[in-house]
Amino acid sequence: MSASGSKVSSVISLKGSTAIVTEFFGFCINSILYQRGIYPPDKFQTVTKYGLPIHITNDRGLMNYLGQVLSQISEWVMSGSIQRFVIVISSAASGEVIERWVFNVETDKQMASSGRTSDKSEVEIQREIQALIRQITVTVTVLPLIKVPCTFDLLVYADEDVDIPAAWEESDPKYVIGATEIPIRSFTTKIHKVTPSVSYHEDD
């Protein structure tokens, strides 16, 4: 007895798309903190994700902090309230902003509110994310060397009517003065689209 084959297309729900975007942000934060030397190498371990070796922190305090931030970001991605996510790298001594990694987020609110699913395959999305992360790694090699100890801040731009947790604070945008910007390729689940770029100050 033979079975007739049928093609099963993957579907991605709003919840699934939110999980993909939130997970991507988590790996990007870790990767950038490692590649820019914000924490020493022994604070990271290597895992394989998106078919690539990626460094993630093994520092308990940093893991807990990032977990809390990503949990809140996930809620805002799910509700379509997030507009932009930003990683700011500043001089620990002077506070001068050295780099500003921006991840613009577009939400198809009609798809999100109607409960419609995306027919884009997860394999295709993973390929787009892989290419994006490869470009971030290449971009880091052309950025000026960071020569001073630095700290980082995570900024979230959300709709004005969202509830802000008590632990979160209002912040200025922390722009890079006299910035040069490098655009980076995007990825989309069809429900959410993420488009990164990095701004930095060129060495005099």
Image (cartoon, helix red, strand yellow):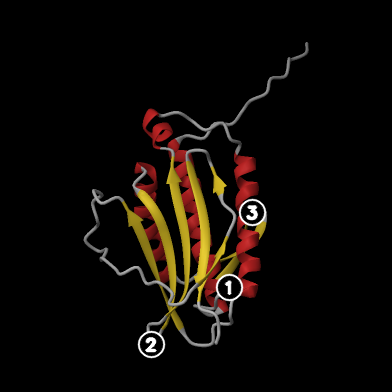
Q: Which residue is mark 3?
A: 130
Alpha-carbon span between mark 1 and mark 3: 16 Å
Q: Is residue 120 above or below residue 49?
A: above
Mark 2 crowdedness (10 Å alpha carbons): few <14, some 14-19, many ≥20 = few
Rendered image: mark on residue 35: 1
Choose top left, top right, bottom left or bottom right for residue 130.
Answer: bottom right
User: Which percent across, then down, holds residue 51?
Assistant: 67, 54
Precedes in sequence: disc 1 or disc 3 = 1
Front one among 55 and 1: 55
Q: Which numbered mark, 1 or 2, is in the foreground of this view?
A: 2
Determine the residue positioned at 58% across, 35% down: 120
- Can residue 159 be seen from the camera position used here? yes
Q: Residue furthest top?
A: 1
Instruction: Say what secondary structure mark 1 lies in.
Output: helix
Q: Which numbered mark, 2 or 3, is in the foreground of this view?
A: 2
The amino acid sitting under disc 1 is: Gln
Rendered image: mark on residue 94: 2
Looking at the rendered image, the quarter that the N terminus falls into is top right
Choose top left, top right, bottom left or bottom right for residue 3.
Answer: top right
Front one among 16 and 193: 193
Instruction: Say what secondary structure mark 3 lies in.
Output: helix
The amino acid sitting under disc 2 is: Ser
Instruction: Say what secondary structure mark 2 lies in.
Output: loop
Judged left or right of residue 82, residue 142 is right
